[in-house]
Amino acid sequence: MEVLVFGAGSLGSLLGGLLARAHDVTLVGREPHVSAVQADGLRITGAETLETRPAATTDATGASADLALVTVKAYDTEAAGRALATGDYGAVCSLQNGMGNEDVLADAVRAPVLAGTVTYGAGLVDPGHVEWRGRGTITLGAWRPADDVAAAERVAAALRAADLNVTTTVDVRRRLWEKLAVNAAINPVTALARVGNGALTEEPLAGLARTAAVETAGVARATGVAISDETAADAAATVVRETARNRSSMLQDVTRGRRTEIDAINGYVVDRAAATDRAAPVNRTLAALIGGWERGAGVGPS
Ligand code: KPL
């Protein structure tokens, strides 16, 4: 199968490198990573050590593949959609943080759009070198279920052929909302307090994170996705415990002075709350604080 991985950051590079064991993979990314992969291949260390040789490019205009995996930051999804629209794909699968990405992609491309959550851990060490920080699972499903269930099964089978741990679900929206509740709780709180995920086991940050998760579950229910307060709070607390030694992606963005995915996480919750005539004061406050930091750092949306 031909696979294009759109977004050769840490997760995209790890998945692309692993998929290259069984498929014909092209990474679409930025320099100097792309040149390093073209010259010497991709080195994966950590959970396993392996070297693979995916193709790599900075420009996917007019490309075609059986599958496009989208792993770009949420704020780059529109640009990814525009590039994908110039090519031809059997299926497009978003494996991104936050919500709203799938609708952007579905508006841009003709192919079936799938969505998934990923718990594989990865970090980019150097150009051409990614660290595999934890085995995980990928859960994926069709974004528009009636049309695309067969595409989800095909893609899952292809990922399994490269030894990835993949399950499919008929309720991917619920999965994404559950993950959104976890991200809405952990990411902004750790980024604002400049602490690792494990610090959210202690009050008062634990209570703040729990309130954000529960508020997100309320908004999910208002949009027709049944997640109980307990499910959301327990999911956030479990991820805090299981990733206690990790620094959230938003904390990493803030410490590196980069734009965050706040708009696709807490910002999305606030938007959906407004659309259903609800208030989401905790998510709104967290989004405003991170948004204020982005503006002050000169990295906010233009
Ligand atoms: O996905 C994450 C992130 O950092 O973006 C969590 C689940 C919060 C783990 O760090």
Image (cartoon, rainbow, N blue to C red):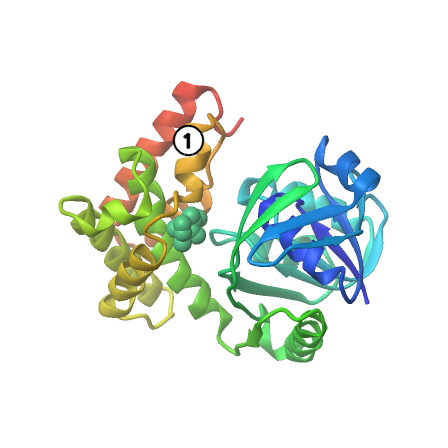
- Residue bearing the label numbered 1: 254
| Quadrant that contains the C terminus | top right
Vertical placement of residue 227 versus 265, above or below = below
From the viewer's perspective, is 254 left or right of 82?
left
For this rendering, which residue is in front, 179 or 132? 132
From the viewer's perspective, is 144 left or right of 235?
right
Q: Position of residue 194 (x, y in %)?
A: 31, 33
Toward which corner of the image does residue 167 lie, by quadrant?
bottom right
For this rendering, which residue is in front, 53 or 96? 53
Q: Residue at x 52, y 79 (%)?
A: 170
Residue density around tag 1, few if under 14, some if 14–19, many if 20 or more, within 10 Å: many
Question: Is residue 247 among the parts visible in the rendering?
Answer: yes
Vertical placement of residue 224 versus 119, above or below = below
Q: Residue at x 52, y 63 (%)?
A: 135
Question: Is residue 272 among the parts visible in the rendering?
Answer: no
| Quadrant that contains the N terminus | bottom right
Q: Position of residue 74 (x, y in %)?
A: 54, 45
Q: Position of residue 196 (x, y in %)?
A: 32, 42
For this rendering, which residue is in front, 37 or 289? 37
Vertical placement of residue 231 versus 261, above or below = below
